[in-house]
Amino acid sequence: MENPSHHTAEPSVAELLRGIVTDAKDLLNQEVAMLKLEARDELRKAKTTAITLGIGIGLVAAGGMLLSVMLVQVLAVFLEIPLWGCYGIVGSSLAVLGGVGLAVGTSTAADLTVAPQPTVKTQK
């Protein structure tokens, strides 16, 4: 009995290189697609967060205005100052506090450095 040899033709170097290039191209396309999906997901999260923050800021502002009016009315009841004077006291106090907050925030913002930090993926 004769043992027939099963000699398979090995791929040439050009075919191997073509396969490597095709695989690299496919991998790059998959990476780009994944990056697009991640960016879309982050954008959706940012949108939801912005809406939630906007609603929260609006509610806090409305509550602050109502509390300011309440404080004016309390001053008018317990002190013998005209109502317009109570509004002046509360308004000027809030303006001073807001100015101090802006000054502190501005000086803090000037000290910030906004440089992107390399991530683990970027370093790899």
Image (spheres, rainbow, N blue to C red):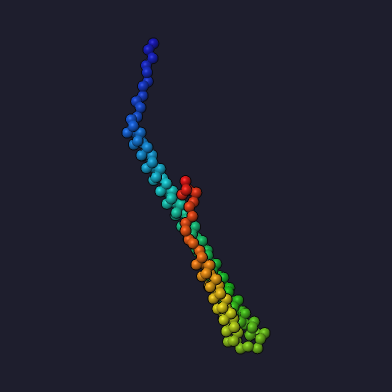
Name the image quarter holding residue 97: bottom right
Residue 41 falls left or right of residue 87: left
Residue 83 pos. (x, y %): 60, 86
In the rendered image, is residue 44 in sight?
A: no
Q: Who's the residue at 36% across and 21% down the image?
A: 7
Residue 93 pos. (x, y %): 58, 79
Along the viewing direction, whichever of 105 and 6 lies nearer the viewer? 105
Q: Who's the residue at 38% across and 14% down the image?
A: 3
Residue 79 falls left or right of residue 44: right
Residue 68 falls left or right of residue 10: right
Question: From this viewpoint, which residue is outermost toward the front?
Answer: 111
Q: Who's the residue at 66% across and 86% down the image?
A: 79
From what the image shows, is residue 30 above or below residue 80? above
Q: Who's the residue at 64% across and 82% down the image?
A: 74
Along the viewing direction, whichever of 113 and 11 lies nearer the viewer? 113
Residue 60 pos. (x, y %): 56, 70
Name the image quarter holding residue 56: bottom right
In the rendered image, is residue 19 in sight?
A: yes
